Image (cartoon, rainbow, N blue to C red):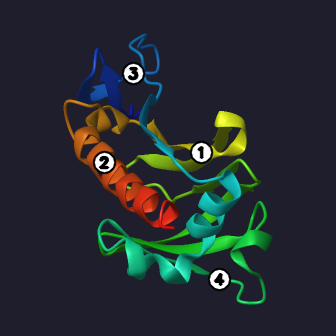
Amino acid sequence: MRSTISTHFFLYRHHLFVSPLSRASNLPTTPTTKMITSTIEIAAPPAKVRDILLNFSAYPEWHTEWLKRIELKDTTKTPQELSSGDKIEVDIENFKFVAEVKENTESLFSWQGPPVFTIAGLHKFHIEPANEGASTIFTQTEDLKGLLAFIMSPSLLGKKMRAHFDIFHRDLKARAELA
């Protein structure tokens, strides 16, 4: 009789291990979760901020870093008409991928990207009214799940992603606050 041992990847106390494990192992093997978040207040009403956010074709006019392009796969729809399950093509720093829209409401636009190196990301843009609707609290988050999600912690690659969010926010704020 031949026995088999399979190779497992597991995370234990924020360290990735590759090891042959028997089925009886009690070491944790569940994926980790990390969230990258950035928030800014914009002196413009939420509807204006949302219109700018969803005007994907105008991004090159006001934002030329990081988030290069978003295109609709279904050209019969407008960005405002996107709904859960619709596909968009996203270009982030020349990494192009097809994402699935998860939500598109007055207060949230989100998509699920494909897994990359065992990490899957749910990207969200939150648009909340402030000062009785005269301004907007804009929050961008990335919920990362997977065995290697720990590398996105603020002390590792998460710091770079957060910096990209901040640049996008700066540019969105400048565009929305134009008279």
Which mark is drawn over residue 73? 4
The amino acid type found where label 2 is placed reads Met
Q: Nearer the viewer, residue 88 or 166?
A: 166
Quadrant assignment, res 75: bottom right
Q: Element type at marker 4?
A: loop
| Residue 142 x, y percent position in the rendering | 47, 44
Q: Which quadrant is the N terminus positioned in?
A: top left
View extreme (top): residue: 26
The reply to whether residue 54 is visible in this rendering is: yes
View extreme (left): residue: 155
Q: Element type at marker 1?
A: strand
Crowding at mark 1 (Cα within 10 Å: few <14, some 14-19, many 20+): many
Q: CA distance from mark 4 to mark 2?
A: 25 Å
Q: CA distance from mark 1 to mark 4?
A: 29 Å
Q: Nearer the viewer, residue 74 or 8?
A: 74
Q: Which residue is mark 1?
A: 136
Mark 2 and mark 3 in contact? Answer it, CB < 8 Å.
no
Q: Residue at x 47, y 66 (%)?
A: 178
Q: CA distance from mark 4 to mark 3?
A: 45 Å
The amino acid type found where label 3 is placed reads Ser
Q: Residue at x 29, y 68 (%)?
A: 65
Mark 1 and mark 4 in contact? Answer it, CB < 8 Å.
no
| Residue 6 x, y percent position in the rendering | 37, 36
| Residue 88 x, y percent position in the rendering | 60, 73
Earlier-in-chain disc, 3 versus 1: 3
Q: Which residue is mark 2?
A: 161
Which mark is drawn over residue 172? none
Q: Element type at marker 2?
A: helix
